[in-house]
Amino acid sequence: MELFKLVGVLFVVIGFILKWDTIATVVAAGIITGLVAMMNGTMTFMEIFETLGSSFISQRTATLFGLTVGIIGICERYGLKDKAVDFIKKLSKLTTGSLLSVWLIIRTLSAAFSLRLGGHVQFIRPIILPMAEGAAYVKFGEIDEKGEDEIKGAAAATENYGNFYGQNCFMGASGTLLIVSTLTAQGYEVDALQIAMASWPIAIVIMVVGIVMNFFVDRRLVARYAKKTPAAN
């Protein structure tokens, strides 16, 4: 009877093998597991649906990522990337590194104040990366695959640095609260304000380091393309 409780897991495995609808398979497996619990007398019929409903409500934010992927795909399909490149082409003096440095500062400060701004899917891929590539196109005319990869890496780094080091500057951030709970469990008397204040110097340092790194991105691009393209400035 104990193994019979795992029938829901078996249903999920079978559903995935037969390529059934993922959401329907998981929901059905949950209902089946609940029915097994009802047969054992540990749950009632209404408690099954109450558990499913409360779990969906508490975890509903996990579905937002899927929505943003579709929205960004539609925006790109109808020219969001092209418009970003066209906009940057009008700013002839803007370099790839300076653009990424400005975004790094914005991303770090937005994370520090818990503003939901940024994300590889929402901002880097459809907006920041095309703008950074557009700045390189304006200055050098064309860039090869190696140059594109370097710009992609630098753009992704701004998101990682800004989000990772900026978020703990906010007292209510999940990372800050996790640090407080972990240190408290180890016997250290700290609060969220102390962790947030201690995180600000690190956030400032990472902005400076990021700006320096983006400066060298520009230097490498100049060294690679300045003498190869007639469009170089």
Image (cartoon, rainbow, N blue to C red):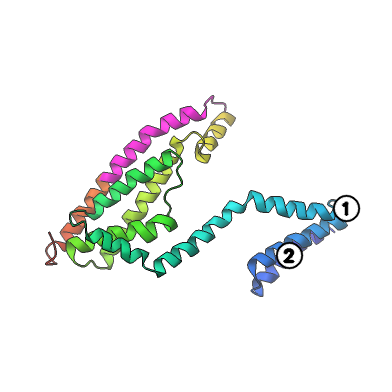
Image quadrant in which the C terminus is located:
bottom left
**Residue 151 as seen in the image, left or right of residue 17:** left
Mark number displayed over residue 119: none
Residue at disc 1, secondary structure: loop
The kind of residue tagged 1 is: Gly
Q: Earlier in the sequence, mark 2 or mark 1?
A: 2
- Give the camera-side residue of 176 and 109: 109
Write down the quadrant of residue 167 in the picture. Answer: top left
**Residue 127 as seen in the image, left or right of residue 8:** left
- Give the camera-side residue of 218 and 103: 103
Q: Which residue is mark 2?
A: 28
User: As displayed, is residue 47 above or below residue 20?
Assistant: above
Determine the residue located farthest toward the bottom in the rendered image: 18
Q: Position of residue 214 (x, y in %)?
A: 26, 50
The kind of residue tagged 2 is: Ala
Q: Position of residue 195 (x, y in %)?
A: 47, 31
Determine the residue located farthest toward the top in the rendered image: 189
Measuring 50% from the left and 40% from the top, which residue is drawn there? 175
State which region is magenta. Answer: 187-211
Magenta highlight on residue 88: no
Q: Which residue is mark 1?
A: 41
**Residue 121 as seen in the image, left or right of residue 26:** left
User: As displayed, is residue 126 above or below residue 200?
Assistant: below
User: As displayed, is residue 165 above or below residue 92?
Assistant: above
- Give the camera-side residue of 36 and 67: 67
Count the marks: how many? 2
The CA span between labels 2 and 1 is: 20 Å
Query: Does residue 2 appear in the picture of this structure?
Result: no
**Residue 198 as seen in the image, left or right of residue 181:** left
